[in-house]
Amino acid sequence: MSDTRATRILLIEDDDDDFVITRDYLDEIPFLTITLVRVTNVEDGLKTLSNKAYDLCLVDYRLGAMTGIDFIKKAKSSAYTGPIIMLTAQADDQLDQLALGAGAEDYLVKSELTAGRFARTIRYALARQDIDSERLERIKAEQEVRAKDKFLAHLSHELRTPLTAILGYTELLINESDNHHNELSVIHRNGKHLLNLLNDILDISKITANKIELHFTDVNLNGLLTDIYSLMRINALDKGLELKIHADQALPKYIKADPTRLRQVLINVISNAIKFTHEGYVDIAISCSQILDSAEGTGKPQGTADLVTGTAQMIFIISDTGIGIEAHKIEKIFKPFVQAADMMTKTIGGSGLGLAISNELIKKMGGSICVNSVIDQGSEFTVALPMTYDKGIEFTPLEINSRGGHLHNKLAKINMTGRVLIADDLRDIRTLVGHMITQYGPQVTYASNGQDAVNKVLKANEASDEAAFDLILMDIHMPIMDGVSAVKYLRSKEVMTPVVALTAANMKGNKEQLLSSGFNHVLSKPVDTDQLVITLQDYLQSAPQVQAVRDSQAPVSAESVLIVEDDTDAAEAISALIQSLGHTTHIAFTQEQAIALVKKTQWSFIFLDLNLGGGSGFEVMDAMQRHNISNRTVLMSGSELSEEKQKQYNFYHILKKPLSLLDIATLLSLD
């Protein structure tokens, strides 16, 4: 107990002599300042205890018609949670057990009592009370965190479900109709904006709870930067801004980093610069301050290929010609829910979480972020991150295609048929290119590296001519097996499927080297839609427009998909998206309907919502396991699923709501 405030003790003692002795012992305790209140019977003791807060209670055993045991039982059954010590005139083991069993903290015999023993007993009782209080506070805090997590998971689901319907139907209308294209694009863009706000809120919640985990892997730095530039260039061009990216020195070809979080940080900072810049440019300057190992690296020039494993201090400087930030407000922009526009123009929306999230992620990566800014002239954000690289890694110049133009189709509507394999180790680029291709009709399958691509091609060729790919788009720099090695291996197996190289390297002679390695064509990153369409036309066949099946109660076929979703709008939207890809669908709105359907029908896929009215998707999975039913079950969820649950149910795939046409097309195209 702290000696900064008096320790309040209630003494229930009817003998005046014993009261004086007890008071004198209490006065001799050196570590406590005590306020002592005395009553002489159980009834007054209970009344006094209920009216005021006491840190400790001392009670005599014999108190007239009632005993100290009676008092302890009544006190513990009331709201009092503090320690109680019983005092008695005689030693009695049975009485000792009764007192402790009733809830007393300790039992003292008056004839054996000394000042030292009394002080120790009180000290220990108060210390245990402090420990118990801290434990209860910790349990309460943990319960509040769990309740908060549960609420956020529920909120996430409740928001993502209607967004599934909004974005799904809007995407269908954009793809299938030329009417009201601008208006539909506004709806889709604002729906995605709502989704980004939701993701920001969940991210900052995870950061606050210290639940953000980093997953480091080998990352192709040039490819990552090219992809970020490709995505951000569109935003800049839409505002009439020039987006520049450059590095004045060679950069490590591969670094060890969490690609998802590194992308998130850089995109947040670059997006912020574009958002608050109305004319001029946004410039991204990259440098690498290499730190050599003192034992082996000394004396070797930067850029050599035989450096020891070391650390590179990567510096990203993002500068703009935007509105700038007042000096005394700079510190606030890294705090949640605060943004420059709120403090200045109040005209630009957003959650105000992007920079706060980036700042926390950078700290977790061991780096830092700072900003210099001048009002009406612009801002300069400097992101510094330590990154390791392996021995022998190559340092190469940054090569990014800086062609202008919007990334959208400027050609007439074209419809093609065929099967296309896209191999790229970066998921966002795979899906971006896949989305561009599926607009024109071909089916798309994805591979995450060269070895994965080789396996899929050989498997498809062995299956049948119909299953074989008509075209392969292959990234050059991938882990496990790079694109060049993959093409050479395929050619050695007499696989003559056309392969188009996707490369961010545009150095002289590079195209000729790729063509001589077995590629049929080369496309530069960022991929230009016009050039991609022309390439597709060279290798794929034209086809009439395929009419999608619209009847959700159409006869079950080998391609029939069961959708289990209790929200009618979301279920119909998901159904429409799947039907647009040529599949028939059936909808179950409850777990009971779903269980009945899976018992009597084999489905090509089951799209299962996690949260169903009156139950959960797990009940459907439990029923399938009880009846030994095996289906490719895709879990749709607005919240994270624990590793334990993932292992328990072994879902074929997990999709986070809202589902997009690209998500579904990618999944249905997997072998």
Image (spheres, rainbow, N blue to C red):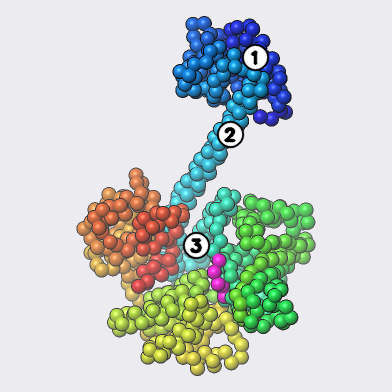
Of the residues tagged 3 and 1, which is closer to the observer? 1
616 sits to left or right of 348: left
Quadrant into which the N terminus falls = top right
Q: Nearer the viewer, mark 2 or mark 3?
A: 2
Q: Is residue 290 visible?
A: no
Q: Nearer the viewer, residue 272 or 56?
A: 56
What residue lies at 26% left-to-right and 59% top-to-bottom?
A: 629
- The residue under the point 67% across, 10% down is 20
Q: CA distance from mark 2 to mark 3?
A: 55 Å
Picture coordinates of residue 610, whole percent (x, y) = 38, 53
The residue shown at (24%, 67%) is: 557
Which amino acid type corresponds to the residue marked 3 in the rendered image? His
> In the figure, is residue 624 to the left or right of 351?
left
Q: Amino acid at mark 2?
A: Ile
**How far apart in space, not on screen, are marks 3 and 1 (Cα)?**
78 Å
Name the kind of residue labelled 1 in the image: Thr
Which is more toward the observer, 454 or 632? 454
Residue 662: % across, % down: 43, 68
Q: Is residue 400 magenta?
A: no
Nearer the observer, 486 or 665: 486
| Quadrant in the picture for the C terminus | bottom left
Residue 210 vs 484, above or below: the answer is above
The range drawn in magenta is 216-221
Which is more N-terminal, label 3 or label 2? 2
User: Tag 1 or tag 3, which sits nearer the N-term?
Assistant: 1
Question: Which residue is tagged 1?
Answer: 22
Residue indicated by mark 2: 131
Mark number displayed over residue 188: 3
Magenta residues, dominant SS class: strand
